[in-house]
Structure formats: C-alpha cells, structure tokens
Image (tube, rainbow, N blue to C red):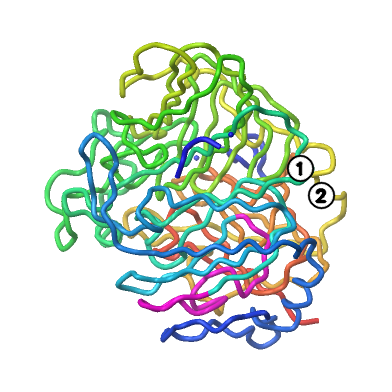
Amino acid sequence: MSPQFNRRSVLGAGLAVAGTGLLAACSDTPAPAKGGAGYVSPTGAEVGAAERMRPGGGRVRDVRLTATPTTLDLGAGRTVRSWAYGDSLPGREVRVTAGDTLALTLANHLPQPTSLHWHGLALRNDMDGVPGLTRPEIRAGGEFAYRFKVPHPGTYWFHPHAGVQQDRGLYAPLIVEDPKEPLAYDAEWVVVLDDWVDGVDGSTPDAVLAELRAGMGGMGHDMGAMPGMDHSMSGSAGPSAGPSRMMMGAVSELLGGDAGDVAYPYYLVNGRVPDAPSEFRARPGDRVRIRFVNAGGDTAFRVALGGHEMTVTHTDGFPVVHARTDALLLGMGERYDVLVTVKDGVFPLTALAEGKRATGLAVLRTGKGAAPAASVRPRELDGRVVTADRLRPAPGSALAARKPDRTITSRLTGGMAKYDWAFDGAPYDPARRFGVRAGERVRMEFTNTTDMWHPLHLHGHTFALANGVRKDTAVILPKSTLTMDFDADNPGLWMIHCHNVYHSESGMMTVLGYQRT
C-alpha cells in the first residue's frame, strides 16, 4: 500500500467520566447462530428491511481480495512468514465514497477458515463476519462475496474475526470518502500502527495465546510494577513456539497502570520497522490530512510528528470540533484523523508503544537532510496528549437529546493470573445476549473491575460518550465505568468485545441482540 494519497478514570470515554442479499459461501463450518427465541436473525427480514432503508446503494465498487500465506518484508533485512491480504503489509487500501455499495470477494487461500469484519461500519448484520454469530466462516479454499451499502464517511479498517488471525498480517484500511468533504488539504496519508510477533524466532499469535492462557499462577499481574522488569519473561514458552512473549513491567500512567500482556519484538508503522521506515513526501507549507489506525493486538500507541502540532478533526470516522494537540493516544481499534501544516526539513513520525519502551517510526520529508535515528523521541510525545474525553462533537454529529429507554449494566472481569477475561464472570457464549428493541435509545454502563485497561468495541453501531463524542471503540481504564448511549437502529446480533485480541479470545466477548417486536 502506498503510504501517501495525491486504569483510574475512563480514557477515550472521558478521563472524568464514571458513571439478502446473502450470497452462498463455500463453507463447511457450522451455520451462524439463529436469532433464537425472540431474537432477530442475522438473515431475518428485519435486516433486509434496514438495508433497504440505509442511505446509498448507487455506484458498486468491486474488489477482489486473497488471504494467503506469504513472506513479508518488514525492512532492514527482516522478513517473516505470515498471512496477509496479497503480499503487502498492511493489505491494499480499499477506498470508496459514502453512498457506494461495496462488493468485495474474499478468496481464502489460508490453511484454516477465516472471515472479514468491517470495523466501525454500520452495515447489514449478515455481512459482519463473526463466525458462529452472523455467518459461517469461509473455509480453506473457499471464497465469499460480501456486499453491502456504505453510508457513512470516515476512516475504518477490516480484519478477520477468527481466533487471533488479526495479529498476523491480515488487516487493511478502508477509507470512505465524503462526497461533500468540508476539509481542504493538499495531501493525505493513511498511517497504520501495529505490534508484530508472527514469524519472529518461531513465534505465532496462537503460541502467544497458549502461553498467556497458561496464566501466571500466584504471581499476579501486579509484578508489572516491579522496577527494572521492563522485558519479557526469560526462558522457553513451554508448549508454545518460540521464546516467551509474556510481558512484565509495562506501565503507563495514561493507561492507569499495566499497559499490556505481550512483549512484541517489533512495532511497525505501515508495515516497516523503525530502522527502515516508510517515508512520506510533501512540500513545505502543504496541509496534510493524516488518518491514523491502530491495528495492534495488545498495544496502545502514543503518536507525534516531531516539530509539528496536529489538529484533530475526527475520531472513529465522526467529526469533532477541531482541537490542537502535540500527541494522540490510540487504543487498539481506534482511529483519529488530523490536519498538519508541514514545515521544511525531515521529521520523525513516532509511534510510542505506550508503556512498553519501544517505538515505531515513519519519516516526513519536505526537504534535504538526514533521516532521524530509529530511537528518536520527539519532545511532542511528552506534550499535550489528546484523548476522546478532551474533544467535543462537531455540530450535526451528536446524538439528538433523548432519555434512555433502556439501561444495561455489565462488569468487565478477570485477570492475568488465570487469564479469564470475561463480561460478568462468564466466558463468551453466543447464546448469552443483552436484549434491546429496535427504535430504543439504549444506555450501556460497563464497570471495569479488573486491573487492566480494555478498548471496548461495539459492532454495527456508533455510540455517544458522556461528552457527546461519537465512537465505536473506547478505552476504559481499571476500576472505572464507561457509559455509552446509542440508537438501536441496526437489527441483528452484534458483538461487543475487548479489542485486545488475546483478551477477547480468552472470553471477553458478548452479544447485543435485537428482540423481535
């Protein structure tokens, strides 16, 4: 993909907040969950009716995509065997205009089933790509044609919802352009951030998950605060492949303490390691739009462009009142758009792996000069840091004022010792659902009883935080409560989960289900 286009309070939710077109698929896997007694099915008439009412449907954008094992070049002589869309990392960008219909066929050349989830899109339920819930997996050797309207502009991305496949190279940006774009800029960059382990010294995400699931016994995760332990545990990972990847001592005040579970060998910006960075080019004085996507599995990134101030314009696809900042903090699954007026010279775009004492890097070049060192840490990283609690919704983007018709409460539970992450102490079961009815204003209150932060993602909807900002993914810190309001306007069965892929696959997933009227 070309990089250029010409834990104490609630973070992201508010640091002060407490409180058919169904086409046949080649698949041998079990059918998706039915709606069940009293619930709307992903293939029900209600879903088709909602799609017909959705704005758009004009131009059809045809795309063909192949998920395949491949060798990826991370730069500086580092190559890894992994899985990807084609042979690039990130996968090739898909770009459409709001109102288009996306017709994307995924061919699965992987040795196991896969799927596609369209992160952040309000799309029809049977196209959401959650195996066992909304539709079957795509078997190895099979393919499936996704087809749906794309009504809302913004910065989105897509990835599998099958095990820990996302923590390989299976992800790509999805940019939905606004046909009435109000922003003026000279160039646009899409910047995808990632933490990388697959294929390094024999490691795989599946092996990492197996190691984490073995737990830490009586050690507890509080060992993370022990001084000097800013490294992975030494020794073998037992039955897992490769060295131990269990992280110790990752600490961040911004994240309320423990910053992560996994010690990744590399942190990437647009698929490149810091000592062989991607390079963006522009002219001095150009106004550049940067779309940031955190595609990581276990890492929040603090991002800054050395020597520059950024103006935040959007988060998770929705516009906000423009806000100046030195740096951004993105949890996994979050996106931010910014505008920057670039200066003359060569500057580091640094992505600090929050709490993990490592960085990713890209370079902005508008003139002559040597590239910055891979270890560069621009002072902006220690300046103003924007999180969603410090933003305000742009006019026209806030939900209409309305009293909730229904309030749902839930607790985030679990810990590192047993690696038993869950909602309300129960591991994921697709038959266990939070029920809502179409047309309701719903309030969901999630209390994080754990000692770790979690980026929560709601499929098929956007929600309003306490300050009105619209999101689909929000970070909740330890011992805090996240309150989200949304309109139940997209019938079906929708996943709610932590976007730490190892937490979700260990049980921190649940379902929002529309009840039949």
Name the residue type under label 2. Leu
Residue 84, picture quadrant: bottom left
Residue 358, picture quadrant: top left
Name the residue type under label 1. Gly
Q: Which residue is mark 1?
A: 468
Relative depth, front residue between 212 and 104: 104
Could you tell me residue 225's position as x and y percent?
33, 35
First in sequence, mark 1 or 2: give its number: 2
Label 2 environment density (alpha carbons within 10 Å; few <14, some 14–19, many ≥20): some
Question: Which mark, by number, is residue 203?
Answer: none
- Quadrant where the image shows the C terminus: bottom right
Could you tell me residue 302's position as x and y percent?
47, 31
Relative depth, front residue between 268 and 208: 268
| Main SS class of the magenta portion in the image | loop
Q: Residue at x 56, y 26 (%)?
A: 385
Instruction: Give left or right: position of 462 versus 91.
Output: right
Q: Which residues are magenta?
A: 120-144
Q: Dots 1 and 2: beta carbons under 8 Å?
A: yes
Is residue 136 highlighted in magenta? Answer: yes
Q: Which residue is mark 2?
A: 399
Q: Residue at x 43, y 60 (%)?
A: 421
